[in-house]
Amino acid sequence: MKTLLTNATVLTLDPDIGDLTSGQVLVEGDRILAVGHDLSAEGAEGAEVVDCRGGILIPGLVNAHMHTWQTALRGVAANWTLLEYFGHVHRGLAALFTPEDIHVATRLGALNQLNCGATTLGDWCHNNPTPAHTDAAVRGLQESGIRAVFFHGSPKPDPKPGQPHFSEIPHPRSEVERLLAGPLGDPQGRVTLGLAILGPHYSTLDVSLHDFELAKEFGLVASMHQGGGKAVSPGGWDVIEERGLLGPDINIVHGQSLDDGQLARFCEQGVTFSIAPENEMTQGHGFPITGHVRRHGGVVSLGVDLESVISGDMFAVARAALGMQRSLDNDASRREQGTIPATSTIRTREALEWITMDGARALGLEDRIGSLTPGKQADIVLLDSNLLNMQPVSDPVSSVVMQASLANVDSVMVAGEFHKRHGRLLADVADGLSELEASGHRIYAELQKRQQHEETAQ
């Protein structure tokens, strides 16, 4: 099966191909066969022709970090600081989730990502107290059709009497082996496995070393939160560096508590960073470290993080990251030079790379996705740039980054298969929405009941 996408501005994000005006993309099966002009003469016989009507084709967006299990809690945490979030969610609401709650939240959350133009998701699942919860999340991803790295994590409740604190519990080898022998056994599959480990900020040194080495043993990307309160293992990163455990397979989320020397060394060794700028500024993590990572030549990827706080729109996340870092750069220039910079310190093309190629690098998928390159997977988004909010298009890259939104996402293709056409998801979500609503309302009602009980007790 071949599909020929025609009559579009093509932003390939491949430096060797560049941008094309009135370009074409030829898809065969699940891969991009060719990118260029007049591809009808290059093996497109019999292809279904899709006239993109002057729209803009871009690589599918990459949401490198999101806790998709919280989809049913949308807006619940919008007014909470990070400390309130820890208390209400990890030490409260999370324990109320059944496997069915995890399944519907993950499936509907992934479908919303497709709807918003993100074809790849780093799903950081750390509410999986049983294998049934884990399997429900994986099933939700697979049923949605999205491409995903399922980062298998661990819950973070307050321990009951006689139980160890979560920071003292090594990542379970048995679950890694089970998943690799079962639903996530194909390393080239649509949904693959990563490890959402605690890292030195949230675990003891022994646990942290165990988890790093476990990920290395199985060849998996290890992702961990860094920052948000005091570290459990001060100096833990020094030991990890000494053991030679850093590299491109290590992904750090947030990272505000790392000093500049550490950031420089980590970037030099290929460590990637997933920054959630809008949520970090909202909850109190500190200013996003985008500029620090850029200065040291590191990989900046972006994520929504929490739909319980913000929307799932990666265009909005990219604008938040770009605007925040430009603001910090402008402020630094005013203080140091007495004037703003002569031109913007970050170009919009780089912000588009953060949510495409750099997101792919953070997830270890840069050989498959992130650019419209022949041979890569056909993960493609068509933006309707003819709509009022994007016209006129003078600079296509800037129009995509600064003007585009969910309203412009006309069509979404993953591995050569359309999941959205003419502005409508092809999946039936009616039943799922009813289940999601019931799940969220039940869980939130329990939180309100607990809060009323606490107020009465005071």
Image: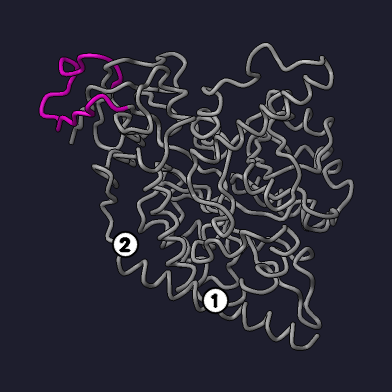
- Give how far across and how far down residue 203 sits, in percent: 79, 58
Residue type indicated by callout 2: Val
Q: Kindly tell me whether residue 76 is visible in this rendering.
A: yes
Identify the residue at image location x=60%, y=31%: 322
Tell me where residue 373 sits by quadrant. Answer: top left
Q: Mark 1 highlights which residue?
A: 443
Q: Residue at x 38, y 26 (%)?
A: 372
* Among numbered discs 1 and 2, the one appearing first in the sequence: 2
Instruction: Identify which residue is drawn at 83% across, 22% down.
Output: 335
- The structure residue drawn at horizontal position 38% and vertical position 47%, both measured from the top left corner, is 114
Q: Nearer the viewer, residue 59 or 193?
A: 59
Helix, strand or loop under label 2: loop
Mark pair 1, 2: CA separation: 21 Å
Label annotation for residue 308: none
Is residue 319 inside the magenta stretch?
Answer: no
Residue at the disc numbered 2? 429
Tell me residue 324's x, y (percent): 66, 34
Which stretch did the figure color magenta? 34-55
Q: Position of residue 42 (x, y in %)?
A: 19, 17
